Image (cartoon, rainbow, N blue to C red):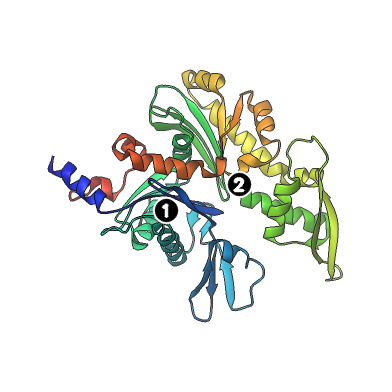
Amino acid sequence: MFKEIKTKILNRLSNEIGIDLGTANTLVYVRGKGIVVNEPSVVAVNQKTGQVVAFGSSAKEMLGRTPAHISAIRPLVDGVISDFEVTEEMLSYFMKRATDFMPKKLLGPRVVVGVPSGVTNVEVRAVRDATKNAGAREVYIVEQPMAGAIGIRLPIHDPVGSMIIDIGGGTTDIAVISLGGIVRSKNLKIAGDKLNVDIISYIRNEFKILIGETTAEQVKMTVGAVVAKEPLETTIRGRDLITGLPREVVITDSDIREAIGQSVDIILESSKEVLETTPPEILSDIMRRGAYLVGGGALIKGLKELLAETLKLPITVAEDPLTAIARGAGIILEDLEHYRSVLIQNDDDISPNS
């Protein structure tokens, strides 16, 4: 009884924030306000002074355009923190941005953070420590496919199987969920960023032109299609590897299909592997209800149709797939006790003083 009263008092004295800590983008949800921050997970650092120059969109614009003493870096690689201090500063900045939309409170916020499925205890601790150091009072960790399922309102607590495929920037999470837990899952280091690398490599090999990551991303979104429908093409500019001079070429959808084909095949095969090991009762639920696509990769043209053909399942692209995980973190915040069983157990859960 005393613990419940204490919790209610503490909650009134602090704000509540949900964070989708993605390799490509970080989204911040504020309880009562919705998603207030949606920025690239990029930080620009002055190497001479060690000071951060820019965060988010401002830093992303600097990618590939900085002088020698400024580095535009991604502090998360494949969904995992690769630079702890920079991640901490980035989280602190985004959380401060979020507080502009909230009334001032005495205590630090209570935060739910989404991480890829299958992360190690060390990686979970790194996320928790970085978030606490950024000013959070309590930190709860949830696996991103579970948060995505909650965000698109799948019946995760019911005795019925749901399949979710989350294609983000650094990782692809494929998960089958039932009764508030992940029954089968697979985490791949193949997602949006890997497709960009594939495109850069293909254009370098086939056209002898060097392009940057930002250009590759734009080409993927403009003419990237994994199923041939209408012909698409765009003009790209880069450095000719033979002459060293600027050159432009026309790239078509078939070029991009060939560039990313191998990576897309791995995502398809991994989805089949998850289904092959799923218990038959749950499989029958999934056959009836289909699978759900979330994350930025859900927007790749033709992917829904290709998955449906390969898996022999109805495929649904979630409404606003980019924000599904952040929305799920927000729903968890609204009823933490109801969703406590889906969280990765952490110090806040087992501490006798919490």
Q: Which mark is residue 147?
A: none
Percent x, y of residue 219 = 74, 52
Residue 117 shows up from this direction: no
Tell me the quarter of the picture where residue 315 sits: top right
Q: Which residue is mark 1?
A: 123
Q: Which residue is mark 2?
A: 190
Q: Vertically, is 77 above or below 86? A: above
Q: Secondary structure at mark 2?
A: loop
Neighbourhood count class around disc 1 (C-alpha, 10 Å): few under 14, some 14–19, many 20 upward: some
Going by the numbered disc 2, the residue's amino acid type is Ile
Going by the numbered disc 1, the residue's amino acid type is Glu
Percent x, y of residue 121 = 38, 50
Which residue is the extreme one toward the left? 2
Which comes sooner in the sequence, label 2 or label 1? 1
Q: Residue visible at 22% across and 49% down? A: 351
Percent x, y of residue 16 = 34, 50
User: What's the CA distance linking mark 2 and mark 1?
Assistant: 19 Å
Q: Residue visible at 39% across and 51% down? A: 124
In the image: residue 312, left or right of residue 255: left
Neighbourhood count class around disc 2 (C-alpha, 10 Å): few under 14, some 14–19, many 20 upward: many
Which residue is the extreme one toward the bottom? 48
Q: How many marks?
A: 2
Q: Vertically, is 69 above or below 17? A: below
What quarter of the picture does the N terminus occupy? top left
